[in-house]
Amino acid sequence: MMKKQIMKEKILVVDDEEGIRLLYKEELEEEGLDVHIAASGEEALKKLEKDKYSLIVLDIKMPGIDGIEVLRRIKEKWKSLPVILCTAYHHYKQDFGTWASDAYVVKSSDLKELKDTIKGILGSR
Amino acid sequence: MGYEILEKVIELTDSSEALEKRFDSLAKSISQSLSFDQCAIYLFDEERKIFSLSAADGDRNDLVHTYHDGEGLPWSAIKKNRPIIANISDVNDGRWRGIKDNGLLGFATAAVYPIKDDTGNYGMLYLKSRKKKIVPLRKRKLLSVISLQIGMAIKTNECILNLTSVNTKMRDMQARLIHAEKLLALGEMAATLAHEIKNPLMSIGGFAKRLSQQFTKDAPERMYADMIVKESKRVEKLLHGILNFSTNKGFDLKDENISSLIDDTLALFEDEFKRINIKIVKELKGNITAVKADAEQLRLVFTNLFTNAMQAMENGGILTVKTDCVEKWITAEVTDTGGGIEPSIIGNIFNPFFTTKAEGTGLGLAIAHTIVANHKGMIEVMNDIGKGVTFLVKLPALVQ
Ligand SMILES: Nc1ncnc2c1ncn2[C@@H]1O[C@H](COP(=O)(O)OP(=O)(O)OP(=O)(O)O)[C@@H](O)[C@H]1O
Ligand SMILES: [Mg+2]
Ligand SMILES: [Mg+2]
């Protein structure tokens, strides 16, 4: 019982840009999260097979399997795993945001919105 | 004798000079070749029912400049529907057969020929001679032909004017189309570019912020890093604006009530308005026909208009917001008291990146314009120099 409370929430950040992966990792670790990273859709799916995560932060625009496809596969296999979609594009919101992902965040150097969204989702479980 | 005048009349329809100018030289030729002392051409104003002087040869002081409804020889010629040849004595009291016409004073013979065709009256040809003279049949026939020709010239001229105005309208429309196309091309290009810039920019801004936190509050390094944060935020704002151009993606149309949409948007500004002493006057029609709209985008239109108004009224003022339903349009008016827009720049305000503000992106109105156009609406600006501006947004009302 005690042990579970100290255990950090483990999340996976998927983004093809190195800078953004590092930024997310450092900022989110400061929020007390156990942050793992994947540089592509393929890598993310591999990691998901091996490990259990509390939440995924997923970039949409990536070479190879893009974020939308990753989202589709995640929802097939791990229905209850929360996914936050991130993109520079505001307009995906209407296209994809509503039907499968749990939240949608427009990328910004100000990570407040992302952090609040993560807290909201993890806190509500 | 006299027939060279016909050439002159025919030339009337065949010249690019302004009609009034051509009339002046024509009047001169007519009086000369038909040996009258004075020749005047009057034009008929259908709406005001008056004949007004257009051209004359001879002393203009002897001329009546306007014949109002029913007055003088011109109107009796109209009533009789034929030319009038009047012989009076040269010492008359401005009267012929009981018809008062001050133009007759000092003349002994007058000839009045209506300029008309079967569709209506165009004007009047008015000739006078100081000495009594006979106007032979040959000259009368000539005068009939001349007035007919003048009528044709006027009609042709009207056609040309109409054509020119249609042409101007078409050119205007074309310019707007090109503008819209430019915006679209810019939007597409900018969206791609913005997307590519956003990711690295996010790293720059994000890490600069982390860097800043490593230094104490008064360290110069902290100030440098904060500057990077601030500037990259500014570029982010710009990119956000640019991305709003590719609006055809995810256009989410629903029936919206414009009054409540505006009310909601206005609510977000209330505190800020209060702080800088801006009074809000709302005249929002509650029971208003809906529009098909993407609420989020339409809110952006009004957000941009309110922001501009606020920036124009930094020292307080009044913001008036009205909605109405006019024929098939739902209209929304945003009026400020911020002094208006310099006339020399008003043609540019809807152009992307046009700004007069140090921190502006110049995208506010360009975005508003694009969004409203995407809704098949219009946005217009009414400028009251020294007072303020009104932006009028018109959207098609839903037919019920
Ligand atoms: N209500 C207004 N009163 C006076 N001038 C205005 C008003 N609205 C717009 N303008 C003029 O039109 C220009 C363009 O406006 P626009 O909203 O497109 O860009 P901006 O306000 O300068 O920048 P941004 O919207 O990105 O902050 C402004 O810089 C200003 O000169
Ligand atoms: Mg990416
Ligand atoms: Mg603006």
Image (cartoon, helix red, strand yellow):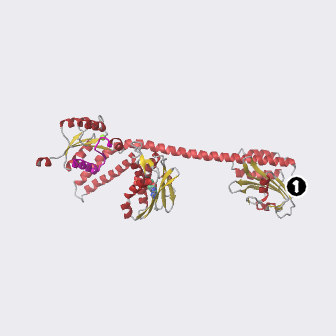
The chain holding disc 1 is B
Which residue carries the number 1 mark? B133
Q: Quadrant of residue B127?
A: bottom right
Measured as percent of width and height from the top left, residue B115 is found at: 76, 50
- Locate residue A105 relative to residue B98 in the image: left or right: left
Is B44 drawn above or below residue B61 in the view shown?
above
Judge by depth and name the residue closer to the eye, A58 or B296: B296
- Locate residue B344 relative to residue A104 in the image: left or right: right
Measured as percent of width and height from the top left, residue A37 is found at: 22, 41
Crowding near pointer 1: few (<14 within 10 Å), some, many (20+)? some
Residue B357 visible to the viewer: no
Q: Quadrant of ligand 1?
A: bottom left
Q: Quadrant of residue B186?
A: top left
In what element is the residue under mark 1?
loop
The amino acid sitting under disc 1 is: Lys
Q: Quadrant of residue A39?
A: top left
Judge by depth and name the residue closer to the eye, B175 or B123: B123
**Residue drawn at point x = 31 percent, y = 48 percent:** A108
User: Which residue in the rendered view is the most extreme toward the left?
Assistant: A2
**Residue drawn at point x = 28 percent, y = 56 percent:** B223
- Specify the segment rendered in magenta: A97-125
Q: How many marks?
A: 1
Is residue B200 on the magenta stretch? no
Residue B331 visible to the viewer: yes
- Locate residue B108 relative to residue A12 in the image: left or right: right
- Locate residue B229 relative to residue B379 in the image: left or right: left
Is residue A106 on the magenta stretch? yes
Is A19 drawn above or below residue B355 in the view shown?
above
Measured as percent of width and height from the top left, residue A78 is found at: 23, 38
User: Which residue in the rendered view is the most extreme toward the front?
Assistant: B400
Q: Is mark 1 within 8 Å of ligand 1?
A: no
